[in-house]
Image: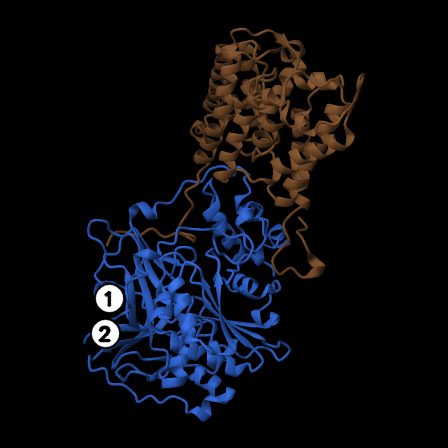
Chain colours: A blue, B brown
Amino acid sequence: MLAVTFKRGVHPPDHKEMAADVPIQKLEAKEGMELIFPLSQHIGPPCAPLVNVGDEVVIGQKIADSQARLTSPIFASISGKVTAIGPAAAPNGAQVQAIFITADGKNTTLPFTGLSAQEQASPQKILEAVHQAGIVGMGGAGFPAQVKFSPPPTDTIDTVILNGAECEPYLTCDYRLMLEDPRTIIKGLECMLQLFPAAKGIIGIECNKPKAIESMMKACEGMQRITVQPLQTKYPQGGEKQLIYALTKREVPSGGLPSNVGCIVSNAATARAIGIAVAQGTPLIRRVVTLSGSAMNHCGNYDVPLGMKLSDVVELAGGFSETDPPKKLISGGPMMGNAIFDLSAPVTKACSGLVAFNEADAALPAEQNCIRCGKCIEACPMGLMPTTLSKLARKGDLEGFVANHGLDCIECGCCSFACPAKRYLAQSIRAAKHSPHLKR
Amino acid sequence: MDRQIISSTPHVRSKDTVQSVMRDVVIALCPAAFMGIYHYGAHALLLMAVSIATAMFSEWAYEKALQKPSTLSDCSAIITGLLLAMNLPPAAPLWMAAVGSVFAIVMVKMLFGGLGQNFMNPALAGRAFLLASYPVEMTSWTSASPFGLDAVSTATPLASLKQGVLPDATMLDLLTGNIGGCLGETCAIALLIGAAYLLYKKVITWRIPAFYIGTVFILTAILGRTGESGTLHVPLYEILSGGLLLGAFFMATDYASSPMTPLGQIIYAIGCGLLTTLIRLYGSYPEGVSYSILIMNLCVPLLDRYTAPRIFGARKKEKGAKA
């Protein structure tokens, strides 16, 4: 099958070989280990705690929830005792309120039961199960799944897209899941299709993952509504708008949502979480993260309980290199992930990995004059003129910035990657986009 | 654990640098420069050396005088010097190369803010300045001979074409550069090798050279030349003679003075081709590449402004940027 793609974009070295062939390894919280559960692991207002300091909790117990529409409950991933409720570092660099739980090592768990075959035929039951399992977009955005699956009635969904592009360099957690647990991912996709009876399911996977394409094709063999579509290897192929364009040739309107063009997009890990929630009744309490980068001793993919501190994950996985210590730690991939300084931040629902750069990789390049080569324009998947936007942003001309469609920037970083003068294009554009002086 | 570096995304950058891009251009110019030395002898080598040295010295001195950090390491002064020399007649006096280089670097490049800020191609502006100031020296051509040993005064193929006469030079002479002309522009094969390297290295795209050369090819095929001895339709001959290949691949593609947008580049290249053809066919000069590129350089800000790419997902009513 011919591989499809979007316009422009870049080809960063993917470095996936460092962790791609390492099977997922399960890490467990030992007795006495402190786990942290931020009350805000999704887009939307934070949850309120349902437990008090001193309470005993068990695996799968709901510990925080909210009545807001845009929300997602939080569950304990270990059994143990609530020791504190207070501020903690989040893996995106922010400070958030969180519940601290110390593991008792007993791993006492609630009994989980999945939906019966009859219940699985009901869209309402599936939507409820997804909501009650605390599922959010696990690719990084953290958008509550049940809200995503309830588009405005004016939008008719005809395509459910499973995002297996995983275009961020270094990250291989979705790849491993597609190899090791394709059936649960397909199960999740089937549940989504159940919600949209008129839709077909497309699984988009980049061509640099032939084994994943093969594995997913095998898992959905004979299914009428599901197809696997190879994608060209290009960044940001897994960006929602780019993926939709590649697969359907539809453009999500500026400022609009995928549902406006009849599409719903979920990444592979999210689909798997839905599959688990519906079939087994287990809420979102674990996820697979990739540890990789030049300063990591044992690059690999680890199935960890949510809430485990990144420092504990790294230690259990073999630690950082002694001879080539980390100089930059990135939560997520190097194109869009956040550089963090505090490894006491926990693994959250949307945290896909930790990339540790040694000194050479972490070095920040010096900026030179723009030579007007236009490489940023040839790279921008949104059709923007990054060099112009960056100049306006630095001048503080926010009016000109908006007039030149600065707000359409998806912050993918292609422009900065491509720039030979090493200008901080995406960085300055992002600063303007989030400027408090901006009038929308 | 040591202190960690915190910065905004992206955390990885491509391997391309300004230096690597400029170095690739210098490498790409080498075959043609070598053929210039082969055809016109040691004086050609001296012209290039003087031109490059003066260009680098003027940039260094300017920055020293203004107490600015030196930008010599970006290698762009080497390109300006080399290109200027390659645009000089083989017998031009050495001081002329020096004067042209100083003008190109100081007046055209540095006074406007240095690399990337020059509004026209410095080497071409230097050449135009010399052509206006020293018209006799700048239009005296010598024939090509191995290492310039038997050089005699000659006419360029374009000057012959201007009379409506098909020149003596064969197609093979044009390809190997065995003709009169500026010292870096004559050998088509060497220029094409360099151009292929630039395209392969993705330093330039095909747009500007293809539309520029294509426009000249089509227009000269249609219009033809009407001279004293009849009409000539020799488009292939037209694109291989004169400075078109050097101009289209190495000078019209200068980043700073060409449009950044794909559509802008196409319009710019067609404009260059149109002007070149008009000057060659109907103007008083036999060759029009430098002036065409310089004139189109001046249109670049306008082109960039009105040829912004279509925004992904733009609603129909609000297409394009309104800067």
Number of numbered discs on residues: 2
Rendered location of residue A60, percent (x, y): 32, 83
| Residue lying at 61% horizontally and 35% vertically, measured from the top left | B209
Upstream in sequence: badge 2 or badge 1: 2
Q: Is residue A373 above or below residue B89?
A: below
Rendered location of residue A123, percent (x, y): 51, 86
Crowd tier of the residue under label 2, counting other residues whose Cα lies within 10 Å: few below 14, some 14–19, many 20 or above: many
Residue type indicated by callout 1: Asp
Where on the picture, by quarter, is residue A24?
bottom left
Crowd tier of the residue under label 1, counting other residues whose Cα lies within 10 Å: few below 14, some 14–19, many 20 or above: many
* Viewer-proximal residue among A400 and A296: A296
For disc 2, the marked residue is: A29
The quarter in which the C terminus of chain A is drawn is: bottom right
Residue type indicated by callout 2: Ala
On the rendered structure, is B93 left or right of B239? Answer: left
On the rendered structure, is A49 left or right of A147? Answer: left
Q: Secondary structure at mark 1?
A: helix
Where on the picture, by quarter, is residue B256?
top right
For disc 1, the marked residue is: A312
Question: Disc 2 is attached to a residue of which chain?
Answer: A
The reply to the same-chain question for discs 2 and 1 is yes
| Residue lying at 60% horizontally and 67% vertically, measured from the top left | A256
Q: Is residue B280 above or below residue A423?
A: above
Rendered location of residue B272, percent (x, y): 68, 32
Q: Is residue A104 above or below residue B217?
A: below
**In this view of the protein, can residue A134 be seen by the observer?**
no
On the rendered structure, is A316 left or right of A173? Answer: left
Query: Could you tell me if the residues under marks 2 and 1 are in contact, i.e. CB atoms within 8 Å?
Result: yes
Task: State how far apart marks 2 and 1 are (Cα).
Answer: 9 Å
